[in-house]
Image (cartoon, grey):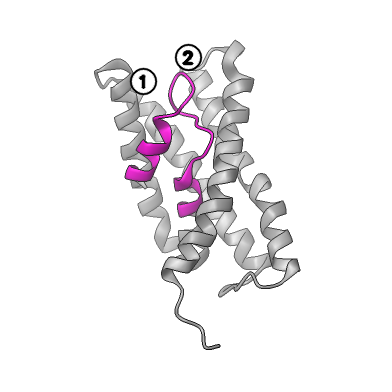
Amino acid sequence: YVICGRLGLSLAVPPGFATAVFLPAGIAVTAMFIAGSASLPGTFLGSFLLNVWISYSIKHQLDVVGVNAALIIALSSTIQAAAGGALLRKLIGYPAFFDNLRDLLLLLLLAPVICLISATLSLIGLRALGIVPATDLMGNWITWWVGDTLGVLVALPLMLVLVGEPQPL
């Protein structure tokens, strides 16, 4: 989570928390989809550590605002992973092979809906902390939402391939 996130955020728009493709969003949703709620502490910790690192990189110091920003983003990411994984399990089921049009369409339709959560909650928190000015809110929100959506659409299938068992022909 942290390594993929740091690589993705190297292309982030200012202040540095939103990027065009954010693979950890897909990793977190997939972990919840596969392992259930046992994966959520890892998502929270990974997101928190990543965002403490980003906060430190922006200011070259760690302060209360940076730690609070990391906590808000970690909580938002965890809520998104929990909701996303649970929704996919309920509507598609696990294990899922994504070998039929219904499952693929559900993934394509649900990913953008799931990814509304972190973009919205995180940016509300970052705005409240004064990190993101009101004038930059919409641009950051769109970038965050698209980045998480693409992260889910790219990382979820790749993660399923990595953890899947070989299927008989």
Instruction: Give above or below for 6 relative to 90.
Output: above
Residue at x 66%, y 68% (from the top left corner): 92
Q: Sequence-wise, which precedes: disc 2 or disc 1?
A: 1
Rendering coords of residue 127 (x, y %): 53, 19
Rendering coords of residue 113 (x, y %): 68, 46
Tell me if label 2 and label 1 are in contact, CB under 8 Å: yes
Q: Magenta stretch containing residue 13, yes or no? A: yes
Instruction: Give above or below for 120 relative to 43.
Output: above
Q: Which residues are magenta?
A: 2-28
Which residue has dot 2 on it?
Answer: 130
Instruction: Give above or below for 39 relative to 6.
Output: below
> SS of the residue at dot 1?
helix
Q: Which mark is residue 166?
A: none
Rendering coords of residue 135 (x, y %): 61, 11
- Count residues near mark 1 (Cα–Cα under 10 Å), then give few for <14, some for 14-19, many for 20+: some
> Would you identify the image quadrant in which residue 144 lies?
top right
Amino acid beneath label 2: Gly
> Would you identify the image quadrant in which residue 85 lies?
bottom right
Rendering coords of residue 13 (x, y %): 49, 22
- Count residues near mark 2 (Cα–Cα under 10 Å), then give few for <14, some for 14-19, many for 20+: few
Which residue has dot 1 on it?
Answer: 65
Q: Along the horizontal axis of the image, is 68 left or right of 158?
A: left
Residue at x 47%, y 14% (from the top left corner): 130
Amino acid beneath label 1: Val
Q: Quadrant of the C terminus?
A: bottom right
Q: CA distance from mark 2 to mark 1?
A: 9 Å
Residue at x 55%, y 41% (from the top left corner): 148
Residue furthest bottom as drawn: 168
Residue at x 44%, y 47% (from the top left corner): 24
Instruction: Give above or below for 1 relative to 159.
Output: above
> SS of the residue at dot 2?
loop
Q: Along the horizontal axis of the image, is 28 left or right of 113?
A: left
